[in-house]
Image (spheres, rainbow, N blue to C red):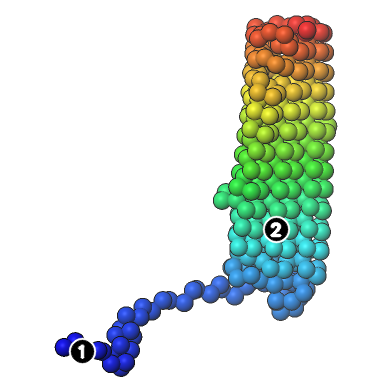
C-alpha cells in the first residue's frame, strides 16, 4: 500500500530545495562635489540618479533638470550647466564627460544612454551638440578634446549600433559630424571636419575614414562620404575647400583618396558615387572643380601628382573607364570630358 506524504513532510522537502539567490548589488552612493547639483543634497531638481555609479566634479550640473536620471556617469569640472544638458546621460549605459563640456541646453542629453560615450574636455558646447551620441550601441563612442562645438554638431553620432571615433580639435561648426557613424562606422582624425556641415552623415549606414587635417577650410566638406552602404577613405590634409569631396563614396560607391589631394572648392565632388569606384593617389586633384564628377558611371584611377588645376580631369571618366597616369593633366581643363 502506497503512503501519501503529509503536508508537513512536503513543506520540509520544499524548504530543502529552495536556493538562496544573492541580492543584486546596490550602486554605490553618488559622489557629488558640494558646489554641484545646485549646492544641495541630491537627488534634487538639478540632479537625480538611475542606479549606476555617479561622480560629479566641482561646479557642474547647476541648472534645473541639468543632470536628471544619470546612469553610470563621470562628469568633470564646470560641465553640464544648462537645461537638460546631461539629462539621461549614461542611463542604462556609460558616459564620461570631461571638464568644461556639455554646457548648453540639451547638449549631451541621452549621451551614452543604452550605450557608451567618452567626451573629452571643452567639447560638445552648444545646443544639441552631442545629443544622443553613443545611444543604443554596443561600441564606445569617443569624442576628443575641444571637439564637437557648434549647433547640433555630433548629434546622433554612433547612434543605433554605430561606431564613431573623433579625435581632438575636430567637428567644430554647426552640424559638423552630425549623424557620423549612425548605424555605420566613422573615424575622424585630429583637426578635421571644421566648418558648417562638414562630415555630416559620414559613415552613416556605411563606412568612412577621414584623416587628420582634412575636410576643413570652409563649409560642407566631406558631407555624406561613405553614406548608405558606401565606403570612403580620405587621407591626411585632403578635401579642404567648400564642398570638397561632397557625396564621395555615396550610395554603395567607393573611393580612396590619398594624402594632400582634392583640395579646392568642389574638388572631387561626387567621386565614387552611386556604385562607382574612384582611386586618387597623393598630391592629386587639387584645384577648383578638379576631378569633379570623376568616375560618374565608371571607374577612375588618378596617379600621383595629377589633375592639379582648375577643372582638371573634370568628369574624366564620364564616358569610359579611365586611368590617369602620374604627373599628368596639370593644366586648366586638362583631361576633362
In the rendered image, the quadrant that contains the C terminus is top right
In the rendered image, the quadrant that contains the N terminus is bottom left
Would residue 178 be seen by someone viewing this image from the given angle? yes
- Residue 22 drawn above or below residue 319: below
Q: Report the residue that reaches farthest toward the left.
A: 1
> Which class describes the residues within 10 Å of circle 1: few (<14), some (14-19), or many (20+)?
few
Task: Residue 222 in the image: state x and y as whole percent.
Answer: 74, 31
| Foreground residue among 306 and 245 | 245
Q: Which residue does the image show at 74% across and 41% down from the upper left?
A: 177
Badge 1 is on which residue?
A: 3
Q: CA distance from mark 1 to mark 2?
A: 63 Å
Q: Report the residue that reaches farthest toward the front.
A: 1
Residue 110, numbered label: 2
Q: Which of the 4 image quadrants contains residue 199?
A: top right
Task: Residue 162 in the image: state x and y as whole percent.
Answer: 62, 45
Would residue 188 be seen by someone viewing this image from the given angle? no
309 sits to left or right of 275: right
Q: Which of the 4 image quadrants contains residue 83?
A: bottom right
Task: Residue 20 in the image: state x and y as whole percent.
Answer: 38, 79
> Which class describes the residues within 10 Å of circle 2: few (<14), some (14-19), or many (20+)?
many
Amino acid at each position: 500500500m502506497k503512503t501519501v506524504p503529509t503536508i508537513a513532510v512536503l513543506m520540509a522537502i520544499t524548504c530543502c530545495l529552495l536556493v538562496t539567490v544573492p541580492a543584486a548589488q546596490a550602486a554605490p552612493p553618488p559622489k557629488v562635489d558640494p558646489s554641484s547639483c545646485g549646492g544641495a543634497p541630491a537627488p534634487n531638481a538639478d540632479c537625480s540618479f538611475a542606479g549606476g555609479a555617479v561622480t560629479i566634479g566641482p561646479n557642474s550640473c547647476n541648472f534645473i533638470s541639468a543632470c536628471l536620471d544619470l546612469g553610470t556617469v563621470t562628469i568633470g569640472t564646470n560641465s553640464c550647466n544648462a537645461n537638460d544638458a546631461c539629462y539621461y546621460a549614461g542611463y542604462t549605459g556609460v558616459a564620461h564627460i570631461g571638464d568644461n563640456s556639455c554646457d548648453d541646453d540639451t547638449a549631451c542629453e541621452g549621451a551614452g544612454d543604452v550605450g557608451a560615450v567618452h567626451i573629452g574636455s571643452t567639447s560638445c558646447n552648444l545646443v544639441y551638440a552631442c545629443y544622443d551620441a553613443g545611444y543604443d550601441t554596443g561600441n564606445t563612442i569617443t569624442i576628443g578634446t575641444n571637439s564637437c562645438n557648434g549647433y547640433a554638431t555630433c548629434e546622433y553620432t554612433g547612434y543605433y549600433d554605430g561606431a564613431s571615433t573623433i579625435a581632438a580639435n575636430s567637428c567644430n561648426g554647426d552640424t559638423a559630424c552630425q549623424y557620423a557613424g549612425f548605424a555605420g562606422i566613422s573615424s575622424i582624425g585630429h583637426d578635421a571636419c571644421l566648418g558648417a556641415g562638414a562630415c555630416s552623415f559620414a559613415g552613416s549606414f556605411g563606412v568612412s575614414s577621414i584623416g587628420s587635417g582634412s575636410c576643413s577650410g570652409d563649409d560642407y566638406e566631406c558631407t555624406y562620404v561613405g553614406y548608405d552602404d558606401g565606403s570612403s577613405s580620405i587621407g591626411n590634409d585632403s578635401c579642404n575647400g567648400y564642398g570638397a569631396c561632397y557625396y564621395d563614396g555615396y550610395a554603395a560607391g567607393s573611393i580612396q583618396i590619398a594624402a594632400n589631394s582634392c583640395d579646392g572648392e568642389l574638388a572631387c565632388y561626387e567621386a565614387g558615387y552611386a556604385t562607382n569606384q574612384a582611386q586618387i593617389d597623393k598630391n592629386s586633384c587639387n584645384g577648383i572643380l578638379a576631378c569633379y564628377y570623376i568616375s560618374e558611371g565608371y571607374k577612375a584611377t588618378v596617379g600621383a601628382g595629377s589633375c592639379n588645376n582648375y577643372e582638371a580631369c573634370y568628369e574624366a571618366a564620364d564616358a569610359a573607364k579611365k586611368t590617369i597616369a602620374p604627373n599628368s593633366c596639370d593644366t586648366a581643363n586638362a583631361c576633362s570630358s
